[in-house]
Image: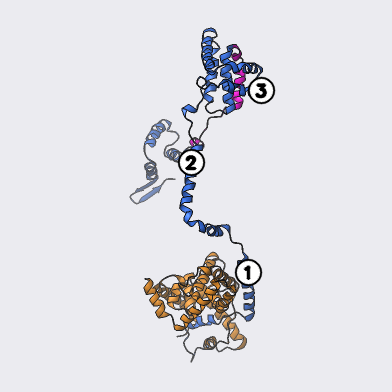
Chain colours: A blue, B orange
């Protein structure tokens, strides 16, 4: 480089050279062609629905509040109606809600499928009054108490089970329960043959479910596992008898205290020495 | 605050700039009214400057072409939202700079040069090259090429914000006020960044400087 008798060169001067970096004329031809294609693509590009939707609903802007309020009210009404809790009055008890005779007659085809004795009973059922059914049912239980004390507990227990389950059973199960009550009232001997059928039906209709187990309840909390690790680290395995007492103590102190006690025993600084236990 | 800004803009803006801004605004109104072809005039007017700013920020001509086109498309798509709070030129610059900055952040690790030729016909570059070297012919071209690479390398070593300020001020010739508007920061910040960037460039380009 010949720097003699030349003017000073600064950073600004060098940066001026960047201005002289220019593309050729052919470059601009290609640039314009590409830009035109992209511009056309942008023009015909279908706008996403979430961009056009606000424009569609822009005309309804003044109805936003009443529409929203109506929607909330409708949702509240639907949710209250659908998720109404089952009140005690809703549950069916055979003594209180014995179906009337026409209802029993109407349900006869269902009963016919179940068993022949029941069909015979149902044919005769229209003559039975609802009040009579209830009283007859009570009488039947009383008779059973006096005559067949060995069988009655089983039958009444089954009856209770069926009546309890009626609260959450399907309409057909309720009908069968009513039929069973009516049959038991009319003919206790005949009713004795029902339990097997009813029981089998009940088991089919309402399969026994395993009690619900919370998966999280089965897990050991992380804090417990950490505590046990730290306790195991702190106490040697040979000290079994001492360990139980230490566990009791460890369960009473907090995690932070336990950790501090461990780290304090692991690091030891005395005088000019510093020991770390691994 | 707004009054101060407006006053500052009025004081800084030259009559030519104001005339230019009015002319741009007229075209913008036409495009907003549905005259799509009128946008071509804006493209023709600003394509070199938009390409220049993007090219000087990326040091890559292919990326610069794509980003400049993207900036024009974005401006075209959202021109109905342009209300004239700033000049169209500033608004377009802001779109281009923001697109470029997001591109640079996204491809921070991938950077390679693809440089345009230095036009030796321009009086300024001719004078600087002549001051730097006595070489002629092929040797001179090689020297200019080497200097160009060194210059771009030094610029790429700056942070994105510092590079933007230097490019807008020293190469594109924008005022501090305009740069502050484009970068949406204060004029003081622009001055500070410019000073720091020049210091770094000075240390990087020391062999080519002469006092």
Residues shaded magenta: A189-218
Q: Residue at x 48, y 37 (%)?
A: A220
Disc 3/disc 2 C-alpha distance (Å): 40 Å
Vertical comparison of A131 with A63: above or below: above
The residue where tag 2 is placed is: A77
Relative image position of residue A228 (x, y in whole percent) = 44, 38
SS of the residue at dot 1? helix
Observer-nearest of B185 and A226: B185
Relative image position of residue A254 (x, y in whole percent) = 37, 40
Q: Give the farthest residue toward the bottom.
A: A5
Q: Quadrant of residue A172?
A: top right
Vertical comparison of B20 with A131: above or below: below
Q: Is residue A207 visible?
A: no
Relative image position of residue B201 (x, y in whole percent) = 47, 77
Q: Quadrant of the N terminus of chain B?
A: bottom left
SS of the residue at dot 2? helix
Relative image position of residue B131 (x, y in whole percent) = 52, 88
Q: Residue at x 49, y 28 (%)?
A: A90
Q: Chain of mark 1?
A: A
Chain-order first, disc 3 or disc 1 = 1
Q: Give the farthest residue toward the left.
A: A271
The residue where tag 1 is placed is: A40
Q: Are marks 3 and 2 in contact (CB under 8 Å)?
A: no
């Amino acid at each position: 480089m010949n720097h003699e008798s030349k003017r000073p060169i600064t950073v600004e001067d060098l940066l001026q050279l960047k201005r002289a970096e220019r593309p050729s004329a052919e470059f601009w031809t290609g640039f314009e062609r590409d830009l035109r294609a992209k511009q056309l693509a942008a023009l015909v590009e279908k706008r996403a629905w979430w961009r056009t939707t606000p424009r569609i609903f822009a005309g309804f802007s003044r109805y936003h509040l009443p529409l929203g309020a109506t929607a909330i009210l409708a949702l509240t009404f639907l949710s209250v109606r659908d998720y109404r809790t089952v009140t005690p009055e809703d549950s069916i008890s055979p003594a209180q809600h014995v179906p009337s005779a026409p209802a029993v007659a109407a349900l006869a085809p269902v009963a016919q499928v179940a068993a022949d004795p029941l069909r015979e009973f149902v044919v005769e059922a229209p003559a039975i009054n609802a009040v009579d059914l209830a009283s007859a049912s009570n009488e039947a239980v009383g008779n059973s108490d006096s005559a067949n004390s060995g069988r009655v507990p089983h039958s009444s227990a089954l009856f209770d089970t069926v009546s309890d389950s009626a609260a959450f059973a399907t309409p057909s199960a309720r009908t069968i329960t009513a039929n069973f009550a009516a049959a038991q009232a009319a003919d206790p001997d005949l009713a004795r043959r029902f339990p097997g059928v009813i029981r089998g039906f009940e088991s089919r209709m309402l399969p026994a479910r395993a009690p619900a187990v919370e998966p999280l309840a089965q897990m050991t909390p992380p804090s417990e596992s950490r505590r046990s690790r730290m306790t195991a680290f702190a106490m040697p395995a040979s000290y079994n008898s001492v360990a139980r007492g230490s566990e009791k103590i460890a369960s009473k102190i907090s995690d932070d205290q336990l950790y501090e006690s461990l780290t304090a025993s692991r690091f030891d600084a005395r005088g000019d020495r510093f020991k770390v236990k691994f | 605050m707004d009054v101060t800004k407006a006053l500052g803009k009025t004081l800084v803006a030259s009559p030519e700039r104001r005339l230019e801004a009015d002319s741009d605004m007229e075209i913008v109104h036409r495009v907003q009214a549905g005259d799509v072809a009128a946008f071509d005039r804006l493209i023709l007017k600003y394509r070199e400057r938009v390409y220049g700013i993007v090219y000087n920020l990326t040091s890559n001509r292919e990326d610069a072409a794509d980003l400049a086109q993207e900036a024009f498309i974005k401006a075209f798509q959202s021109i109905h939202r342009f209300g004239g709070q700033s000049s169209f030129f500033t608004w377009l610059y802001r779109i281009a700079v923001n697109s470029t900055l997001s591109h640079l952040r996204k491809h921070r690790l991938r950077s390679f040069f693809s440089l345009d030729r230095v036009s030796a016909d321009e009086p300024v570059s001719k004078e600087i090259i002549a001051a730097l070297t006595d070489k002629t012919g092929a040797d001179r071209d090689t020297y200019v090429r080497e200097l160009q690479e060194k210059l771009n390398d030094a610029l790429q070593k700056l942070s994105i914000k510092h590079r933007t300020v230097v490019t807008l001020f020293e190469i594109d010739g924008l005022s501090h006020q305009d740069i502050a508007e484009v970068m949406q920061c204060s004029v003081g910040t622009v001055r500070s960044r410019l000073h720091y960037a020049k210091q770094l460039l000075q240390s990087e380009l020391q062999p080519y400087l002469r006092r």
